[in-house]
């Protein structure tokens, strides 16, 4: 976030720093003054024990007051023309600062990532393609989807001077944040992390809710003037590669588009998964998936049945519990739930002021969120073969997580042993995506809310029947049953070299792609949010999508610069990737036999989640390696 250099009101600054995240403020003060004491005791923060921002950093009142006073002086001096003492920390110093800011060791490889992310050595962007080359080659790209990934690809292509068209089936940008309008819908990653690195925002709450996320993506599209490149209401049917012309033809109904390359940005959570329950079409009232919540539905005074207890249900149930006459929740398996005091907390104007006016503040605050929510937990997700209790946890640290979350569950459900028994998972923490408590336990304790753990057998005209034969009356049935995430590019017939069908190459639900992006036999086709790129342990997918967008556009500009007409992933590159992904997954929590998730396909292979840390994937995609590809030059007549 830009920090304009102008004299600041010292009184306003003094007020704002009272709301500052102190570990962040210490890094700012050090960069401005160069005084090493801000990296040492008593100002060195302690490690956060949970997922919160740890604003106090564990500093006592005396140290906190001293830091705030010094920060006001340093920031005021900077605003009046003083130069930062450490504007660009060297490699060793930045590594030290990253670990100091977190109060725990941060791996050295984070230094390269954060040096770029924090703007010390900013990403220069793609190498522009000269207009003459664009015209001579008739260079263009079709992007399928105007959600988060599609917009990122579009901005990057725009920077590179490569013409593009976005085909979007909906009438507005936003992807899942446009279509998921159910009550309580929001992000379970902090707002200042789940945001574009190149388009900051003063978020109203620490965890963005659906309406603000939809508005944010729309504002981003407007800011970069992307709408003139988008054709709305276009549902793509097919994409076919023409070997002779080295071009793709994309069709939707009777219309078609041709392009040098296609970027699929259709997303992972776009096809609602509806259970095959007898009687679905016999229910007398509204029955729908959470992703298709009726805009005019009022549940006030209604008996509502919610089938499922995953991420969407955990947001819906607390949001409607006070309005319904009775709420029945049908649970297939319980979820691990983490406490988070900031889930509904508003971001105050003092914090907004700091983000806008204080140098380095936004960058350091965002880094702290990234470490906690992206990669901090990764080491604890590895299976320890020597661990004595594999039935309940993976290793000693994971067992500590289990004890922590179990204590929290018991605290929230004190006096309700019936709910404790139903809600305590029997699989290791992080086996499914960790969910944040947004009032879930409080909602379950209500007298007018009932949690049912028997399976759902069928739907009747007036309610839901369980496997035990009990009938539960309902006026509204909500299917919170997730998405078909195992079938990538659903509904689009993609044909590559020699007419090879992509879904045949993937045996329908066994999708593979090198880096989750490219597939042998499908030249100039690039996937975003492809196989094995979902951040199952949590964190911001926007960060991953930006890495993919950079990688893809760098390949496109390289093709233009080097006269490459077709670029196709080598089978051996894909095989190396798949073998490594599968081997790593065998050592991770998602291969634990204790739970069923959408992560694994019908063969038991993990097809959605990445086994890598975010920093690893960022490094893998930072600089494309052309040796991973077969390259075919542009025919001489078109060169």
Image (cartoon, rainbow, N blue to C red):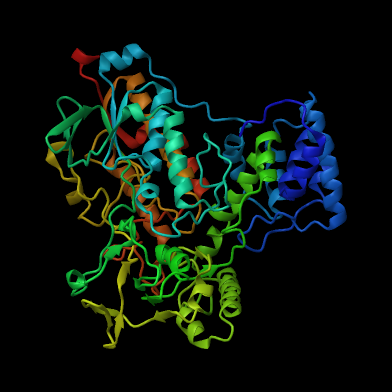
Q: Is residue 316 left or right of residue 354?
A: left
In this view of the protein, can residue 7 be seen by the observer? yes
Picture layout, residue 159 above or below residue 94 = above
The C terminus: image quadrant? top left
Q: Residue furthest top?
A: 132
**In the displayed structure image, the side of residue 370 where residue 529 appears, left or right:** left
Q: Is residue 165 left or right of residue 70?
A: left
Please report the residue visible at 75 percent of the width from the left and 32 percent of the height from the top. 86
Q: Quadrant of the N terminus?
A: top right
- Examine the image and state in which quarter residue 579 appears: bottom left
In this view, 239 is above or below 380: above
Q: How many marks?
A: 0
Up/down of 431 relative to 202, above or below: below
Residue at the location (20% across, 18% down)?
A: 635
Residue 64 horizontal/vertical position (percent): 82, 52
Closer to us: 490 or 500: 490
């Amino acid at each position: 976030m830009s920090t304009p250099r102008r004299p600041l009101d010292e009184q306003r600054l003094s007020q704002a720093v009272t709301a500052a995240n102190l570990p962040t403020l210490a890094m700012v003060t050090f960069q401005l003054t160069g005084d090493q004491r801000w990296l040492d005791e008593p100002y060195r923060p302690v490690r956060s024990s949970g997922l919160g921002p740890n604003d106090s950093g564990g500093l006592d009142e005396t140290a906190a007051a001293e830091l705030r006073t010094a920060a006001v002086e340093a920031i005021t001096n900077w605003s009046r023309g003083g130069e930062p003492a450490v504007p660009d920390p060297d490699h060793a110093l930045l590594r030290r600062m990253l670990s100091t800011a977190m109060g725990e060791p941060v791996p050295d490889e984070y230094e390269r990532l954060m040096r770029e992310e924090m703007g010390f050595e900013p990403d220069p962007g793609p190498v522009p393609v000269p207009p003459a080359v664009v015209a001579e080659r008739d260079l263009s790209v079709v992007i399928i989807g105007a959600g988060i990934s599609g917009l990122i690809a579009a901005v990057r292509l725009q920077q590179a001077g490569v013409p593009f068209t976005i085909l979007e089936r909906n009438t507005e940008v936003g992807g899942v944040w446009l279509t998921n309008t159910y009550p309580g819908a929001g992000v379970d990653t902090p707002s200042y992390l789940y945001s574009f690195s190149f388009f900051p925002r003063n978020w109203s709450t620490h965890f963005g809710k659906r309406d603000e996320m939809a508005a944010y993506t729309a504002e981003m599209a407007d800011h970069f003037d992307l709408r003139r490149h988008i054709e709305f209401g276009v549902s793509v049917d097919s994409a076919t590669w023409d070997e002779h012309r080295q071009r793709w033809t994309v069709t939707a109904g009777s219309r078609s588009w041709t392009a040098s390359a296609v970027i699929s940005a259709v997303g992972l959570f776009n096809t609602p998964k509806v259970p095959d329950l007898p009687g679905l079409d016999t229910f007398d009232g509204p029955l729908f998936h959470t992703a298709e919540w009726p805009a005019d539905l009022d549940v006030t005074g209604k008996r509502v049945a919610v089938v499922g207890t995953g991420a969407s249900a955990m947001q819906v149930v607390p949001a409607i519990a006070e309005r319904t006459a009775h709420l029945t929740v049908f649970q297939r398996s319980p979820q691990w739930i983490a406490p988070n005091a900031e889930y509904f907390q508003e971001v105050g104007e003092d914090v907004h002021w700091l983000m806008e006016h204080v140098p380095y503040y936004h960058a350091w605050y965002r880094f702290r969120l990234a470490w906690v929510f992206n990669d901090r937990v990764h080491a604890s997700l590895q299976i320890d073969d020597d661990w004595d209790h594999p039935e309940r946890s993976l290793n000693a640290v994971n067992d500590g997580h289990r004890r922590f979350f179990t204590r929290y569950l018991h605290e929230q459900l004190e006096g309700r042993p019936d709910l404790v028994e139903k809600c305590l998972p029997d699989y290791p923490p992080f086996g499914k995506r960790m969910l944040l408590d947004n009032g879930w336990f409080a909602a379950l304790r209500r007298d007018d809310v009932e949690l049912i753990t028997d399976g759902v057998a069928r739907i009747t005209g007036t309610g839901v029947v369980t496997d035990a034969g009990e009938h539960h009356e309902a006026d509204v049935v909500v299917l919170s049953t997730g998405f078909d995430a195992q079938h990538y590019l659903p509904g689009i017939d993609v044909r590559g070299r020699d007419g090879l069908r992509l879904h045949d190459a993937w045996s329908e639900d066994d999708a593979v792609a090198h880096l989750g992006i490219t597939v042998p036999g499908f030249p100039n086709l690039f996937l975003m949010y492809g196989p094995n790129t979902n951040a199952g342990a949590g964190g911001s997918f926007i960060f991953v999508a930006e890495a993919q967008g950079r990688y893809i556009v760098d390949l496109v500009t390289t093709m233009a610069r080097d006269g490459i007409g077709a670029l196709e992933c080598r089978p051996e590159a894909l095989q190396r990737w798949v073998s490594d992904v599968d081997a790593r997954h065998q050592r991770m929590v998602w291969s634990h036999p204790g739970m069923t998730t959408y992560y694994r396909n019908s063969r038991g292979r993990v097809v959605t989640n990445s086994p890598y840390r975010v920093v690893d994937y960022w490094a893998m995609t930072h600089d494309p390696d052309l040796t991973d590809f077969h390259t075919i030059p542009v025919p001489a007549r078109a060169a």
